[in-house]
Amino acid sequence: MDYSRVVDKLLARQLCDWDVAERNYTALGNVVTRTLSLGESSVTLQFNPERRGSSSAAIDKRSLASRKCFLCSGNQPVRQKAVLWGDHYKIQVNPYPIFTRHLTIADLRHLPQHLDGRVGDMLQLASALPEFVIFYNGPQCGASAPDHAHFQAGVKGEMPLYDEMAHATTHMLADSDEGFIGYVDTLGRPVFTIETSTQRAAERYAMRLLELLPIPHGADEPMVNVLCWWNKTNRMWHLVVFPRRKHRPACYGEGQGRLLLSPGAVDMGGLWAVPERKDFDALTPEMIQALYDEVCMSRHELSSIVKGFSRHWENLQLI
């Protein structure tokens, strides 16, 4: 099945039949943006008031237990339609978009947000939707529904990092005939990058990386945001992993002196959807860099992970 064509038809239908989606995608066409330079990287700020719900989502256990899950079919608006993908996913139009084409790909079952066992799904989604970047927010890294497993997707080219990775200097950690894993430390936040020609190699490198990343107390997986895309030209998968150490910055909140910013995968990719006008106007390159420094893994922590790869080089060889 040509899922790109199916998704285009779904979006067109939803913009005609669903007033919430039509209103918010129309508003996105008139959104105000500005660009900040972080040296070798850039950040696009997008003033997007409709993202307030995501930025301010309460994800503690009590709050999650007291609200209906908005990714479960029985709790969704009647006009929100879906396309089935694989055995247990549904593709839907995200009604509060950051991208001109913004999708949510949720498990049909109400299972916790968890990456283990789903890297292969992410890779297959990327090849099924080659015009999109597929992304994953960890349960403590920007997911507003950490109680329901899901990915999201945004059209390629609207996230600055997508183009920047092609020119970034990559330090190699391990490679094979099928591809490599390395890291980039010149873009203002640490980035692990995996490029392979086979799904098997991508999964092996990704899972080895996740094994080496620290797991916070009380959590089930490392704090990460992940981007994934498929390059039809060279037939390569690309996985970009951002190791995190904090969910939200200390300045998070509403009101004077606070910033309503809860960074997720899209923000890590250089596209910041800012729901408050005062924050949009106030943010500077120095402030964005400080936010990255606070929520992302430090250079010292990155060095420890790199050394871990060196110590386990034999285990990284693909067989």
Image (cartoon, rainbow, N blue to C red):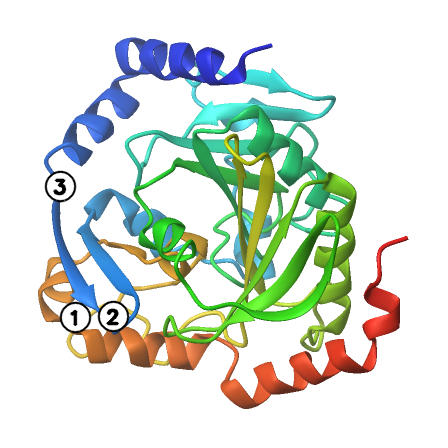
Tell me if label 3 and label 1 are in contact, CB under 8 Å.
no
Q: Is mark 2 on a helix, strand or loop?
A: loop
For residue 283, the mark is: 1
Q: Indicate which disc, 1 or 2, sits on the residue closer to the N terminus.
A: 2
Estimate the spatial distance between the alpha carbons at disc 2 and disc 3, rounded to whole Å: 19 Å
Q: Circle 3 is placed at which residue position?
A: 31
The kind of residue tagged 3 is Val
- Residue 262 lies, in percent from the top left, at 38, 63
The kind of residue tagged 1 is Leu
Residue 278 makes an appearance in the image = yes
Tell me if label 1 and label 2 are in contact, CB under 8 Å.
yes
Q: Circle 2 is placed at which residue position?
A: 259
- Residue 18 lies, in percent from the top left, at 31, 15
Q: Indicate which disc, 2 or 3, sits on the residue closer to the N terminus.
A: 3
Crowding near the residue tagged with mark 2, few <14, some 14–19, many ≥20 C-alpha atoms within 10 Å: many
Q: Measured along the vertical axis of the image, is residue 78 above or below residue 142?
A: above
Left or right relative to 295: residue 112: right
Crowding near the residue tagged with mark 3, few <14, some 14–19, many ≥20 C-alpha atoms within 10 Å: few
Q: Measured along the vertical axis of the image, is residue 115 above or below residue 309?
A: above
Estimate the spatial distance between the alpha carbons at disc 3 and disc 1, rounded to whole Å: 17 Å
